[in-house]
Image (cartoon, rainbow, N blue to C red):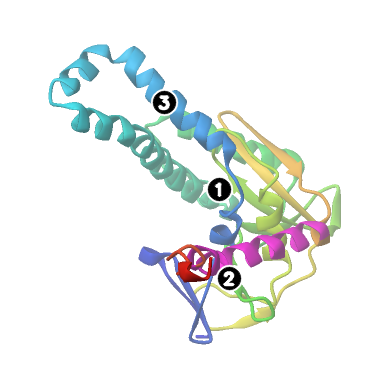
Amino acid sequence: MSLTFTPKRHLYTLDGERVPSVTSIVGVLPKGGLVYWAAKLVAEAVADQASTVDAVRALGRDVMVAALRAVPDQAKRKAGDRGSLLHELATGVVKGEPSELIADPDIAGCLAGLARWFDDVGFEAELIEHPVGSRAFGYAGRFDVIGSLERDRSERWLIDLKTSASVYGDTALQTAAYARADFHVVPGSDVELPMPRVDRIGVVHVQPELSELYDLGDIDIAFNEFLNARALYVSDKRRADLVRAPLQLDTALF
């Protein structure tokens, strides 16, 4: 198979060569909101868990600093685990698979809202979770779903499902990269097929009891922005190497 994926390392190889994933490339974009979010979590931990903080403080400054620094990472892992589970279950909704009994009322509500959205708009899925690759630009990934709305079956949408608290315009770059890939691979096979025409890109925000579609605009503009992000991603090592060691000057010349 020319395109392979190693889940544990989140690593794609294309024709035997490692290529970056779409999400890794888009990840180079600045996330200013994360800085505020992390600072807020630490501040809330200090304010709301005073007794715990005091107990940790008694163990020494270094221990306390390490504990507080770990707060955002712990929250991120917890949110990531929930998001992965919810995304997997949401994909099952897209496939029309029967929903299992979900104990978490928030997750159950999200799935109900997504199912209701698909029914309301008459979404008809054509391709679901197919890996894609681009030999022309050297990247790979996997889209969520390609299909059409009942209002216009001739118009094909590539849609990403987001289960996070908010959705962001950066998803336009992600979906455009999938839409402009060279080929997609039929899951469970080695069969490569040319990417179908994609007319629109969008993101469905999966929320409790409600899901909403956001149109992510012009695909070509977003794809050009994605290629700019890719250039930054692949040049990261070059920029890091620029400051590995200071320039050794012959001071006798001055």
Q: Residue under label 2, please give it.
A: 140
What's the amino acid at mark 3? Leu
Q: Sequence order check: which comes first, mark 2 or mark 3?
A: 3
Q: CA distance from mark 2 to mark 3?
A: 34 Å
Q: Which residues are magenta?
A: 221-241
Q: Which of the two residues, 80 or 185, is positioned nearer the viewer here? A: 80
Label pair 1/3, CB-CB below 8 angstroms: no
Lower sequence index among marks 1 and 2: 1
**Cα distance between the residues tagged 1 and 2:** 25 Å
Camera-nearest label, 2 or 3: 3
Q: Write the residue at 53% across / 60% down.
A: 24
Q: Which residue is mark 3?
A: 41
140 vs 112: above or below: below
Amino acid bearing label 2? Ala
Secondary structure at badge 3 equals helix
Residue 35 seen in the current view: yes
- Left or right: where 93 falls relative to 167: left
Residue under numbered circle 1: 93
- Residue 149 pos. (x, y %): 78, 50
Nearest the viewer among 63 and 246 is 246
Main secondary structure type of the part rendered in magenta: helix
Q: Quadrant of residue 72?
A: top left
- Residue 56 got which mark? none
Amino acid type, label 1: Val
Instruction: Judge depth for marks 1 and 2 and give the one in front.
Output: 2
